[in-house]
Image: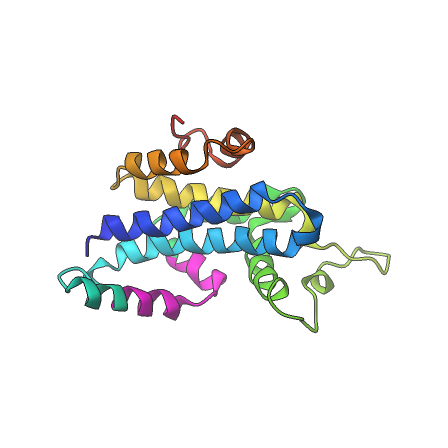
Amino acid sequence: MDRQLVAKTWVNYGLTDLYFAFDSDDDAFSDNVLFSEIMGLEKFAKAVLLFHLHQEYEGMTRPAAKKRIDELARGMGHNFKEMLKQLSHFMADEIARIKKTDFDGYSGSELICAVYAGYMKTRYPVPTPISDTFPIKGTKLKHDPLWSSGITKFIYAVCNACFASLSLDIDFTDLINQYSRKFSHKESFRRFNNLFWEKRCKPSI
């Protein structure tokens, strides 16, 4: 199975997750929205990592390759800290920049941990919320990065960095056209594209 097809497939699923989250504006489903954003991030990250692990599956029959890719992706789990570490082997400057960037009061490094906490909190009852690690000095209050605009901006930044990295080797025109045909009838489509895509990545849709 071709590495470009593998990466495109994962980016396609990730982009759909991110757009679903953006289009779902009902507060009653806020956990589901955050979970979809986090899953979008995971799929963009795995698109890059699986692309660079091509020697593990290229040359196999299609069924064997699909099974191996599934094993590799499952093996990465939801360990966002480790995935970002692995991404830095292929896009070191990008990851270093994102870690240092302030996303509405939270550093990228802080949000890496928050993303994993968000994955757990939006799926399961957790005994210790991530807000416990963000106390407000001099008070009994706490910050909760999971419900800040910063976590969405962080996720978008990492996804754009992944897309930019893959775009050096992959032409995404067909994927973007497919994405546009599928969702362009939605009222929120243009707003999402304006907010999600960085200038260097933004396709002509």
Residue that extends furthest to the top in the rendered view of this protein: 204
* Rendering quarter of residue 54: bottom left
Q: Using the image as rendered, state which of residue 158 and residue 36 is in the foreground.
A: 36
The segment highlighted magenta reads 68-86
Seen in the picture, residue 204 relative to 158 is either above or below; the reply is above
Asked if one can make out residue 89 in the rendered structure from this viewpoint, the answer is: no
Q: Is residue 80 visible?
A: yes
Choose top left, top right, bottom left or bottom right for residue 25. Answer: top right
* 82 part of magenta stretch: yes
Q: Nearer the viewer, residue 164 or 90?
A: 164
- Is 46 inside the magenta-drawn segment? no
Relative to residue 189, is residue 71 depicted above or below? Answer: below
Number of marks present in the image shown: 0
In the picture provided, is 189 more to the left or to the right than 146? left
Identified at 40% across, 27% down, the residue is 205
The location of residue 122, given as percent across then percent down, is: 62, 62
Residue at image location 34% in from the left, 43% down from the top? 165
Residue 129, horizontal then vertical, whole percent: 70, 66
